[in-house]
Amino acid sequence: MAIGAPDDACLLNYTKYPYEPPGECISRKVVVREWDSITTNSCCRNALNAFSQALALQALQNDYIFLHEKQWLHCQFPVPPQDSIDINACGFHHLNRDSSVCSSLSLSSFRTTYVGEYSSVLEKCSNFDSLTFNDSCLSCTYHIEEMREYLMGQLHLKDNATERDICGVAVVIAVSANKIENETWVDNYYRCLPALDKGDPFYFKIKYSTLKIIIWIIIPTFVLILTLVVGKHVVKEHMKKKKKKNAKFLEGKRSRTWSGLYRFSKAEIESAINFNTRKVCLGSGSAGRVFKGILPSGQIVAIKHIFKDNTSDRFTREVEGWSRIRHPNLVCLFGCCEEDGDQYLVYEYCSYGNLAQHLQRSDSFLSWDIRVKIMRDCALALRFLHSYPDGCIVHRDIKLTNILLTEDMDPKLSDFGLAKMLGMDETRVFTDAKGSIGYMDPEYMTNGKLTSASDVYGFGIITLQILSGKQVFELDRDARDNLTRTAKEVQMQKRPLSDFEDPRMEGNYNAADFESILYIAVLCVANSSKGRPTINVVFEEMDKVWRNTEANMVGT
C-alpha cells in the first residue's frame, strides 16, 4: 500500500503475497464455501487468501480490518495473473467496512475489547511445529470458530448469517495480521484454513473438543465391533475369496490414509482425459504417461496413468506422502484413482511445460530475471520440504524436467514418486540408490547414504544448467563432470566468465550476481556432503540476488 496514495487508488498491496491460481479454470458452476464464511465458485479458490493477506497488511497501518466501501470499490480490478478473478466475480463485494457490524471491527478492538479471546486464538495458531500439523491446525481452526461465535454473542448478532460470515473473515484477518511479516508462518496458516471449509471434497473437519471423545470412546468401540464382524465373516467365507477380501481391507485402509484427496472413479478419469474426443499426451516417463484432462468443473488438470508393469510402488508412495503437502512452488496433487488394476494421479496443470524445454527453445530464451526467479523459487520449495514439520522430505529427483512452469513462468517442483521423509538430522542408508544419474549425489550413489544434502547437490546441477544453458538433456556422468569442472574453473578465475554464460543472454545480466550464484552452485556440487551448504543458506543467497534483480528491473 502506498502512503499518500490518490483517493481513487486501491489501498491493497498484492506484492508480498501475490494471488496463486489453483489451476486453469473455464467454469464457474461449482460452488464452494471457504472458511465456512464465504460462498464463492471454484475458479476463486485461493482468491480469498490473497485478499485477506492484503487486508491484513493494510490493517497493520490503518488499524481497521476492512476498507470503506468506496475504497473497496477502487480495488475491483482483475487480480493478476488471472484476469477473470476480481472482487465482484468472486462474491466478495460485501467485505467492506460499511456493510455490517462485524465489518467495522479493528485490530485495536481485538487487542483491547476482546483481548482474552484474541490472545487465546493467537496462542493456538502461533506454532504449527509444536505438534503434528494436523493437530495444530485442528486446534487453531477450532479456536477461530470459537472466537467468531464469541464476537457474535458480544455484539448480539447470534441469528444473523451475514454477520456470522463477515465475523469469521474478520477473525481470520486479525489472526493473520499478528504474524503477517513471517512468510513461513503465513504459509502454514493459510495451508491450515481450508479445514474450516464446508462441503469441500478435499477436506474433512472435526471439532477439536470432539476429537478426544472419538479417540477414547468411539474408535475403540468401532474397532472392536469391526473386528468381530470381519472375523466372523472370514471364518465363514470360502478360501478362494481371501484375496478379494484382503484387497477390500487394504482399500479401506488406503481410504483412511488418503482422506485428504478426492477419490476419482475410473469413469470420471476417462471422461476427463477424453474431453476432446482424443487424448492429449503431455509426456511420458519410466513410471507412466501424463495426459491433459478437464474436470466437470472446467478445471484443467494433468492426469498421470501409472504403467501396470511398474514395480516401484510409486503410486502408493506419492499419494501417501503428498496428499496433504501444499506450497505455491510445488505441483498440487488434487486426487487419485485406483480401480480395475489401473492407477491414476490427478495434478495441477502447468501450461508452459518443463524448464528443460524452455532452455532449449530456438524461438525464444529465458531472460536473466526469469532465470533468477526460477532458481530462487525452487530453493524456496526445497527449503519448505527440508523443514517440513513432520520430518525432512528429500525429493531425490531434482532435475530440469521435474520443474514445471505456469503461464507466468512460476516454477513448481513435480514428481514425488521417489521422495523420502527423514528425521531432521537423519541419515538413512538405501541399498538401491534411485534418481536421475546426472543429478544424483555422488556420495549417495557410492554408499547409499541419503540426506537433505543430496537434494542440494541436484539443485546445484540445475543451477549450473540454468546459468550456462548447457547439457540440458541427456545429462550422463561424463556430461555432468564436464559441466561441474568448467564451472569450478570459471569460479576460480582460471577461465573467463563468458565461457560459462548462456550465449543467448548476450551479456544481459548482472555479472556480480552471476558470480554469486555460480559460487553457491559450485559449493552445492561438492563431492562430499560436508562441503555443501544447507538449503537455508542457498535460499538466502538466491533471495539476495533476486531482490537485487528486482531493484535493477525497477531502476531501468
Image: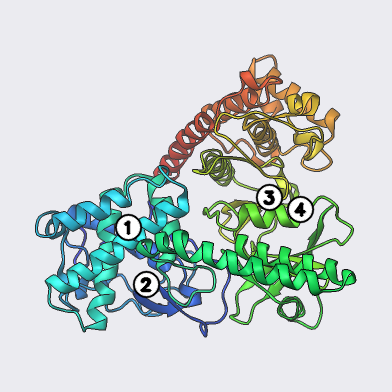
Disc 2 residue type (three-letter): Phe
Residue 550 sits above or below residue 235 on the image: above
- Which of the two marks, 2 or 4, is nearer to us in this view? 4
Q: Earlier in the sequence, mark 1 or mark 2?
A: 1
Left-right relation of 89 to 62: right
Q: Which label sits on residue 416?
A: 3
Residue 20: x and y in percent read 48, 61
Please report whichever mark, 4 or 1, sits nearer to the chain's N-terminal start: 1
- Residues at marks 1 and 3, CA–CA distance in whole angstroms: 34 Å
Q: Are marks 4 and 1 in contact (CB under 8 Å)?
A: no
Residue 1 visible in image = no
In the figure, is residue 267 to the left or right of 167?
right
- What residue is disc 1 on? 13
Residue at 47 percent of width and 75 percent of height: 84
Q: Dot 1: what SS?
A: loop
In the image, farthest residue toward the left: 113
* Earlier residue among tags 2 and 3: 2
Callout 2 crowding tier (Cα within 10 Å): few <14, some 14–19, many ≥20: some
Residue lying at 41% horizontally and 41% vertically, measured from the top left = 551
Residue at 81% x, 50% y: name it. Answer: 312
Mark 2–mark 4 contact, CB under 8 Å? no
The residue lying toward the viewer, choosing from 188 and 361, is: 188
Disc on res. 234: none
Provide the secondary structure element on which disc 4 rests: helix
Callouts 3 and 4 close, C-beta under 8 Å: no
